[in-house]
Image (cartoon, rainbow, N blue to C red):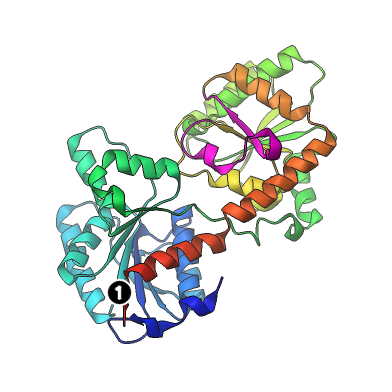
Amino acid sequence: MPKAVFSDFSKFRSRGGGAPVILQILPKLGTGGVERGTVDLAEELVKLGWRALVVAERGELVERLHAVGGEFIEMPAATKNPLKMWANRNRLIQIIKNSNVDIVHARSRAPAWSALWATSATNTPFVTTYHGNYTQKSVIKGFYNSVMARGDVVIAGSNYIADLVKKRHPANAGSVKIVPRGVDLKAFSIENVHRERIEELRDKWDAFGDRPVLMLPGRMSPNKGHILLIEAISLLLGRNKRIELDVLLVGPGRHQNYMQLVEQTIELRGLGLDVRYVGNCDDMPAAMAMADFAVLPSWFPETFGRVSAEAQAMGTPVIVADCGAFPETLISDEGNKTGWIVKREDPEIWADAIEQALALSQSDRVKMSQAAIAHVNDRFSLAGMMEKKLDIYISLLKPQ
């Protein structure tokens, strides 16, 4: 990242007369993707000499935030109680004034309302990131969601989300900026994943042998399409007895009833030797490197599709559903293909796509792997994402 461009503070006027001060607010500084992105952005701001404040309820990433030089301010930001949200607004006004905050960046709806009120009262630039595909089944819910489209700049992680914002909140369409989620290319790099890490996972998951590995990475939730994949595998193996493969379901299991349904479906289809849930994984780069293909049959629209980009960064081609932002994460043209886009909710078509993937020659598989790595490096680098966000911040700072 061209640090010299962003660290030339003489071009900008901070409220405190020094380096810009950015305040991010979210419900809790836990371990999710939004939270990790918050800390990653704080780290980049600190590297540039800026101050990075994070307002949230205390969570697992507070220590990491402190380690990268960010400043944590504890507040009950997850509350949806209107009176407490107003109290948070008053607290934010004091923080903005006392810390000479130049920009407030909200990442979730409840704290965004407090931030909107506080920035309006202090004439402070307000940025939002429209992270979710928020349900909007009533006028009241639509109004509640609308706060995420009220920023001076509204960051959308994909064209899918940008179009959704423009459709739901046409009056705010002009403020939308598309900034795709970034992949940590140091972590998700085949060159940085030692063979021992991959073999350790193979041993743990009993995935040794010559059988191709198909992996569905994602939490055990009906939205992720596990049942659809199981049905597709059943169809595939039923019509082609020569195919052998390991299908690994990888991710946290928090929905006990759904997990039981998945296990029952595997047993009912007689796939106990072919499909198995292996639990959560703390080393996803190694897991992605172990897989021959990542299969992502989500039927609920994803707002970006981070796991698709991470898999491709490891040189693993992907098979994704044709909904939400997943199609934006890969190249499906034959000339430079990095994966397949499949019609959701049709196990027969999924079986066809998986069979086509398994039939690739070794040379075609290598070509697709190389194209996938190049594609993610070009489109979805963490550094590129950070640079775009910093450009947005700079556009809101006042020149001298």
Expressed as whole percent of the image width and height from the top left, the position of residue 364 reads 79, 36
Measuring 71% from the left and 46% from the top, which residue is drawn there?
A: 371
Q: Is residue 122 above or below residue 192?
A: below
From the viewer's perspective, tell me whether residue 178 is left or right of residue 143. right
Expressed as whole percent of the image width and height from the top left, the position of residue 302 reads 47, 39
Residue 127, located in which quarter of the rendered image? Answer: bottom left
Measuring 26% from the left and 53% from the top, which residue is drawn there?
A: 110
In the image, the segment drawn in magenta is: 322-344
Residue 106, located in which quarter of the rendered image? Answer: bottom left
Name the foreground residue: 209 vs 357: 357
Q: Is residue 336 magenta?
A: yes
How many neighbours does mark 1 have within 10 angstroms: few (below 14), some (14-19), or many (20 or more)? many
Residue 126, located in which quarter of the rendered image? Answer: bottom left
Q: Is residue 338 magenta?
A: yes
Q: Which residue is mark 1?
A: 102
Q: Is residue 340 above or below residue 384?
A: above
Expressed as whole percent of the image width and height from the top left, the position of residue 65 reads 47, 70
From the viewer's perspective, tell me whether residue 139 is left or right of residue 226. left
Check disc 1 and report its element: helix, strand or loop: loop
Q: Is residue 53 above or below residue 315?
A: below
Expressed as whole percent of the image width and height from the top left, the position of residue 328 reads 53, 41
Image quadrant in which the C terminus is located: bottom left
Name the foreground residue: 295 vs 360: 360
Callout 1 amino acid: Asp
Measuring 56% from the left and 43% from the top, which residue is drawn there?
A: 329
